Image (spheres, rainbow, N blue to C red):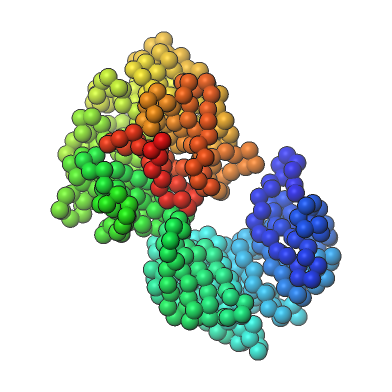
Amino acid sequence: MPDAPGEPRRIEAAAVVPGSGDIYVATPSGLYVSTTGGSSFAAVSHPALATAEGFKALAADSEHLVAGSENGRVYSSADGGSNWTELTLGDGGLAVSDLALTSRSVYTGFSLGVIARYDFAGGTHILNDPNSSGIWSGLWTRLEVVEGASLEQDTLWVGLVTNIGVRPTTNLYRSTDGGTTLTPRGSGLDGASVFSLALNPTDSAHLVVGTVGEGLFVSRDGGASWTKGSGDLRASAILSFSEDPNDEMHLVVSSTEGWNGTHGVYETTNHGTNWTLVDFQTDARAVEITPGGSLLLARFNAGGVARRAPAGSWQETLAGKSVEEFEYDRADRIWAIGSGLHMSSDDGGSWDERSDGTFFAMAQHPANGDELVVCGIGFLASTDAFATPGTEIGPQANDLITSCAFADASTLLAGTSSGDLFVSANYDPSGDGMTWAQLSSPVEVATIRSILTDAGEEGAWYISAVAPDVDFTDDSTSGILRSRDRGESWQWLELYPSTLVWQLHSSAHSRRIYAPFWGGAGVLAIDD
């Protein structure tokens, strides 16, 4: 496999050639093949493949091996990978996201929902153009096909990802005429994004669909009806979490299906045994249950905050403002942190702008309730809850400061978007005489999203490191780290295979730590 500097090793797809058993893998650095059952790999070189800029998709049957590239090209081999022919006519601009084969054709799904059919005998057919059909994808396109007696009788299945944060009626379509007509077939999937499709090779009516946020679904009647998978199959990507400060059984999470977001705010009043969809349909970047019992939802795309007072209806506040995080302090003031710093003293009903700028987190001084620090593009401290402008206190980092926390009255911690961790042992809200030192940590090419001190264990420091799937490199690290010696050494907490811990939250009722995961594990409660 590729291992030189600048050669990404990420495996985008794999295929086994029937008969020979050769294993092909697609990577951003090119195609690789193993003729030894995977014990060794070699780069695939052929003049026809020179136009590819990284590979994204593979498909193989007894007659053809097909590869799709990041720059929209499709290549076919009729001899198991020794010789290749390009089926496309040039760069398409959109990455190939999936391939489905028949003996006559290769159905090709591109990002944004474009679908084309390339016939091995020659000929190209565009089956879906989102600009004219209205059938879009916000990320990739998944395909499965059942070969018919003729091209016009092929059955094509198409799975899409919700586009631009607006969940449609369906993200699953079927065509029984070779892709000419796409008919919605997702009734019962609640419009969830389809991230994967599997078709039983001996029973074309038996399908399995994988979604994000809604779980896995099975159909045995060609998609006419669906049954949701049961058991502990975790498939929710959590952006935000909140625990009711007055009731430890009451929790709220915001789930998303991708960077574009889709509505998915869920609420439980029995500590996670049952969850219900909140009745306000919005893409929520951040959620908060306030001390007064209100529920606040920060919009993902459009900005603004939706507020539901106890036993009340929804109202819109902070129109157009982007909110990354909510915090409440010991005076029960609510803070909205994002494009500016806004404070509410009436449980989120109205807001007073206290500072402009871009911020990502807030830390409250352990001894003074009005002494606050916010961090983001810059680092501001205030001793009067930002009634007057804050003071810049550093550190002078080259990256965004994405998290901050007090370890004690004189010790302030700060984490950055590139994984650097800073400490000031002589904190002063005026900034006078403050010095910063960079701590050594195992975090590499990842964002320190949150810092907790004296939470799960007295005297311990916790940090969450996140390298999202679209930004990671070979060196990226993600997960939860704990230090018991004030940052001198760190231990990775091995909690779950998915390590994209979006944030850490300290319980208001115990030493429990809540860990919301971006990558499919939902929310974990850490008690030890």
Furthest-top residue in this view: 433
Residue 58 falls in which quadrant of the image?
bottom right
Residue 198 percent location from the top left of the image:
57, 70
Q: Is residue 276 visible?
A: yes
Q: Can residue 359 be seen in this view?
A: no
Furthest-bottom residue in this view: 149
- Residues 58 and 399: in front is 58
Above or below 294: residue 82: below
Residue 204 percent location from the top left of the image:
57, 80
Question: What is the number of callouts on the image?
Answer: 0
| Residue at 63% in and 86% down | 148
Q: In this view, does 350 lie to the left or right of 410?
A: left
| Residue at 31% in and 22% down | 365
Residue 361 percent location from the top left of the image:
38, 34
Quadrant in which the C terminus appears: top left
Residue 96 percent location from the top left of the image:
63, 63
Residue 232 falls in which quadrant of the image?
bottom left
Residue 230 falls in which quadrant of the image?
bottom left
Furthest-front residue in this view: 528
Above or below 394: residue 336: below
Q: Is residue 440 left or right of residue 103?
A: left
| Residue at 21% in and 46% down | 294
| Residue at 57% in and 78% down | 156
